[in-house]
């Protein structure tokens, strides 16, 4: 079984599952077993809130534990056996791919046979191999039509902490163009929460903000909704300005916006704005599915 996992700062994604990166440890059994991972005698509630940002995802066990939760959820979605052999496929930004590849592979491959319980059900997973691929570019494996008729395309992957940029020329990544901007969705959320608190005295949640930014109806006061919308637009303008400053002409080269932040752009920027030539890939599962597709292609060669 090949399972792709996109280890985001904001959320963990597999081909069929998406949940926040929050994880809370308990020494004793919590009040509910929902989303609870039992591993090495301790309990972990996975997917509640968001953990404190740690730029090096291998610095502690959190992402390893979240990986186990993701494997359990994805296997359940596939109605697979809970005793399974798995090839784990994951990714890294192209800017640090060569530097971080071996470290992440060792982190995910630290124990080949893993036994744990998830929501009270026992799993025994044999990790047969770990395959790593570049984020963003891997997602385009699912959508080759985006590259077919364009000699140059800019990939803009808007993640939780970073916005990763990469130009593809004739469908081949141009490594010299890779950039990583610390302007991800987490920054946007934090700035909006602070502005709402300053202007209205209300402490809104990230879930409420995200709902407004995705263009869904909200029961919050009109003043708050308007403020969130305005700040969302400022966030978009800041990213577009930073991309231009990085040396990319957004009006000359079409841009594929993907990642968790792509939906924010889709509701606020169109080609008629003449700010850029946008193509939207808003499927948050695209990276994970892309990793699986590439492993499948490698096996047929």
Image (tube, helix red, strand yellow):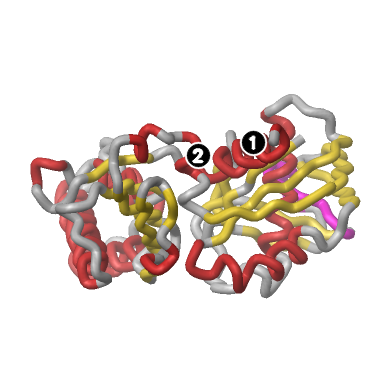
> Residue beneath label 2, please?
141
Span shown in magenta? 30-40
Label 2: which secondary element: helix
Circle 2 crowding by C-alpha within 10 Å: few under 14, some 14–19, many from 20: some
Q: Quadrant of the C terminus?
A: top right
Residue 16 position, x and y percent, is 58, 34
Question: In the visual, does 22 lie left or right of 164?
Answer: right
Give the quarter of the figure containing the N terminus.
Answer: top right
Residue 212 disc label = none
Magenta highlight: main SS: loop
Q: Quadrant of residue 272?
A: top left
Residue 226 visible at all: yes
Q: Is residue 150 left or right of residue 226?
A: right
Q: Between residues 219 and 38, which one lies in front from this camera angle? A: 38
Q: Earlier in the sequence, mark 1 or mark 2?
A: 2
Q: Are marks 1 and 2 in contact (CB under 8 Å)?
A: yes
Decide which of 206, 278 is in the foreground and name it.
278
Question: In the shown orientation, is residue 208 left or right of residue 56?
Answer: left
- Residue 32: horizontal and vertical position, in percent? 72, 44
């Amino acid at each position: 079984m090949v399972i792709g996992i996109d280890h985001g700062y904001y959320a963990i994604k597999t081909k069929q599952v998406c949940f926040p990166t929050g994880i809370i440890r308990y020494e004793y059994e919590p009040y509910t077993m929902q989303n609870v991972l039992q591993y090495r005698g301790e309990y972990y509630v996975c997917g509640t809130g968001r953990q404190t940002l740690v730029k090096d995802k291998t610095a502690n066990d959190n992402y390893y534990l979240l990986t186990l939760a993701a494997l359990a959820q994805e296997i359940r979605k596939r109605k697979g056996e809970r005793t399974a052999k798995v090839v784990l496929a994951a990714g890294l930004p192209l800017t640090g791919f060569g530097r971080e590849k071996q470290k992440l592979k060792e982190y995910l491959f630290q124990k080949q046979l893993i036994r744990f319980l998830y929501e009270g059900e026992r799993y025994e997973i044999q990790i047969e191999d770990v395959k790593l691929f570049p984020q963003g570019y891997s997602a385009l494996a699912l959508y080759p039509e985006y590259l077919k008729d364009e000699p140059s395309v800019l990939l803009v992957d808007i993640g939780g902490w970073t916005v990763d940029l990469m130009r593809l020329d004739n469908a081949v990544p141009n490594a010299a163009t890779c950039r990583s901007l610390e302007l991800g969705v987490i920054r946007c959320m934090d700035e909006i929460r602070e502005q709402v608190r300053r202007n209205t005295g209300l402490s809104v949640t990230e879930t409420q903000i995200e709902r407004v930014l995705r263009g869904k109806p909200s029961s919050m006061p009109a003043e708050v909704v308007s403020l969130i919308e305005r700040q969302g637009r400022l966030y978009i303008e800041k990213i577009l300005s930073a991309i231009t400053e990085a040396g990319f002409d957004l009006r000359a080269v079409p841009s594929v916006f993907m990642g968790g932040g792509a939906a924010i752009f889709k509701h606020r920027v169109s080609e008629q704005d003449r700010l850029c030539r946008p193509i939207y890939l808003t499927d948050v599962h695209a990276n994970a599915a892309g990793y699986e597709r590439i492993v499948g292609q490698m096996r047929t060669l």
